[in-house]
Image (cartoon, rainbow, N blue to C red):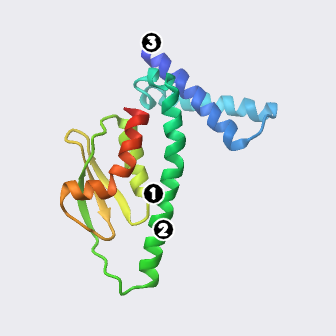
Amino acid sequence: MKQNIGSRIVLFIISFIVWVLFTFSFNLQHLVIGILCSLIVTILVGDIYTQNPWKFKHPQRYLWFLYYIPLLIWEMIKANLDVAYRVLHPWLPIRPGIVKVKTKLKNDTALTFLANSITLTPGTMSVDVDKENGYLYIHWINVKSTDVELASQIIVRRFEKVLEKIFE
């Protein structure tokens, strides 16, 4: 029960901070609405969001997250340019297919971030997660390798190293 309360408090604080950052308003009405929305989110998903709230006490996790955001944006830009180039030059070969990749991540939140990061980069889309065995199944617009290790190196490792430092 104590862990459940800690998770909910952490989620409330993070939700409220995100609210303030998105609205960038310190008007009393906006802050009250932010508190109410954060409370609703906390009540609905507080026990799901963080299983280990003590991890949020480590400031280096926040620094790694600040590093992760531009990394994700850079990977999205590169993938967008690659897909746009393939669209504009239709004679470029594409080999669409689903590949199996391996991940070291075990935490649900870390796996969710990884799967969503892969999906956000055009040309790849997470199809399934096999948490028990540590595999993700990814639809890839141009399969460069069906070898699990090589495909994992190309698709997963760039995100996994940072997400491991944030969530594991």
Of the numbered discs 3 and 2, the one sitting upstream in the chain is 3
Residue at 74 percent of width and 41 percent of height: 24
Work out whether 10 lies above or below 159: above
Disc ID at residue 91:
none
Q: Which residue lies furthest to the right in this view?
A: 27
Work out whether 122 lies above or below 7: below
Q: Position of residue 159 (x, y in %)?
A: 39, 48
On-image quarter of the N terminus = top left
User: Picture quarter containing residue 162?
Assistant: top left
Q: How far apart are marks 1 and 2 (CA)?
A: 10 Å
Amino acid at circle 1: Leu
Nearest to the eye among marks 1 and 2: give it.
2
For residue 133, side relative to residue 24 (left or right): left
For residue 146, side relative to residue 23 (left or right): left
Q: Distance between the residues labelled 3 and 2?
A: 45 Å
Residue at 46 percent of width and 83 percent of height: 88
Q: Name the residue under label 1.
A: 120
Residues packed near mark 3 inside 10 Å, few (<14), some (14 to 19) or many (20 plus) = few
Q: Name the residue under label 3.
A: 2
Q: Exactly how many numbered labels are in the figure?
A: 3
Q: Do the residues labelled 3 and 1 touch (CB within 8 Å)?
A: no
Residues packed near mark 1 inside 10 Å, few (<14), some (14 to 19) or many (20 plus) = some
Amino acid at circle 2: Asn
Work out whether 16 lies above or below 72: above
Q: Mark 2 points at which residue?
A: 80
Q: Where is residue 103 in the image (x, y as percent from the top left)?
A: 27, 45
On-image quarter of the C terminus = top left
Circle 3 sits in a helix, a strand or a loop, which is it?
helix
User: Picture quarter containing residue 35?
Assistant: top right
